[in-house]
Image (cartoon, rainbow, N blue to C red):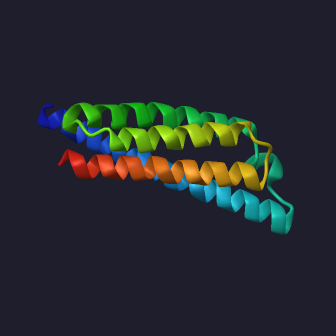
Amino acid sequence: MSTIATMIRGRIDRIGVLLSALCMVHCVSSVVLVALLGVGGGVLMNPRIHEIGLAAALVIGALGLGMGMLRHGKRGPLALGGFGLALMGMGLLAPHGLAEAALTIAGVTLLATGHIANLRHGD
């Protein structure tokens, strides 16, 4: 892959890690704010936010991890990311609450780990 394509893939992976971190912050803060304060449930727990987040994760994950596998030939980052996306999808199907947060947080952690591994293999 050319240097420009490698730079683009690296940026996509970095965006993927950032989005995963933002998702994790959203999940934890939603559960804490709703459980402790009883506020923000209508906005923070809106299913539309989760649907948009999963769609973004799928696009960024497919691009970054897919391009990475083509570049370095390692399947591990793609497998980690794919499993993370599956957990995130399961979280979207779960009722709001602890199970949803646990599945989503586990999913974004695996997805971010896949992006980080992809960055390490790609250089």
Q: In the image, residue 116 lies at what x, y percent?
A: 35, 52
Q: In the visual, does 60 lie left or right of 39?
A: left
The answer to whether one can see residue 5 in this image is yes
Considering every residue shown, the one lying at the far right of the view is 38
Look at 43% across and 36% down and name the residue there.
Answer: 60
The residue at the point 46 percent across, 46 percent down is 111
Left or right: where 94 falls relative to 102: right
Residue at the far bottom in the pictured view: 36
Position of residue 96 relative to residue 66, above or below, is: below
Q: Give the image quarter of residue 28.
A: bottom right
Q: Residue at x 20, y 35 (%)?
A: 71
Looking at the image, residue 49 lies above or below residue 104: above
Query: x, y percentage for residue 10?
Result: 27, 44
26 vs 3: above or below: below
Where residue 35 appears, x then y in whole percent? 82, 64
Say if residue 23 shows up in the picture.
Answer: no
Is residue 59 left or right of 26 when viewed as pictured?
left
Q: Quadrant of residue 86?
A: top right
Q: Quadrant of the N terminus?
A: top left
* Residue 86 against residue 22 in the figure, above or below: above
Q: Residue at x 72, y 48 (%)?
A: 100
How many marks the image carries: the answer is: 0
Spot occupied by residue 21 in the image (x, y as percentages of width and height): 51, 55
